[in-house]
Image (cartoon, rainbow, N blue to C red):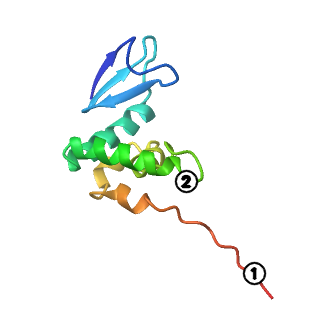
Amino acid sequence: MWIFHNRMVPFKGFDAVNVFGMLLVRPGLEPDEELINHEAIHTRQMREMLYVGFYVWYFVEWVVRLFMKGNAYRNIGFEREAYLHQGDLHYLQHRKHYAWFKLLRKKKGRKRVEG
């Protein structure tokens, strides 16, 4: 993954952003293995969605999730997969295609009530 230090992108409040497989990071930030893996997962997602499809889906899902409970950004399927597996540096070796799709719906744990 190519890494570029840039003053303009990402915007304040963000450390890094992945644009078509290139990682743009704030000056002075050296991305660690987990951040690079997180963004590599996004790059794989982009490729399987033919890049433009990834950005369209990402934006539409973010808008939909703005009106739902919880953090819209963190609940996007792409982000959920990347955050869930960023610590597994071998994840991309065994990742199934469209793995993020299964994470679109949150599974809520149900409490068992005994009567």
| Residue at the image position 39 percent from the left and 42 percent from the top | 89
Residue that appears at 35% across and 14% down? 5
Residue 45 visible (yes or no): yes
Q: Is residue 28 above or below residue 37?
A: above
Q: Mark 1 is on which residue type?
A: Val
Q: Give the class, few, some or many, for how many residues have Cα within 10 Å of label 2's Cα (few <14, many ≥20).
A: few
- Residue 89 or residue 7, whichever sits in front: 7
Residue 61 rendering spot, x and y as whole percentages? 40, 50
Upstream in sequence: badge 1 or badge 2: 2
Q: In what element is the residue under mark 2? A: loop
Badge 1 marks a residue whose secondary structure is loop
Residue 68 numbered mark, or none? 2
Outermost residue toward the bottom? 115
- Camera-nearest label, 1 or 2: 2
Disc 1: which residue: 113
Q: Quadrant of the N terminus?
A: top left
Residue 90 visible, this orientation: no
Q: Amino acid at mark 2?
A: Met
Total numbered labels placed on residues in the image: 2
- The image quarter in which residue 4 lies: top left
Do the residues under discs 1 and 2 have CB atoms within 8 angstroms? Answer: no
Q: Position of residue 77 (x, y in %)?
A: 42, 52
Whole-angstrom CA distance, mark 1 to mark 2, is 27 Å
Along the line of sight, the residue nearer the viewer: 36 or 22: 22
Furthest-left residue in this view: 50
The residue under the point 32% across, 38% down is 40
Position of the C terminus by quadrant: bottom right
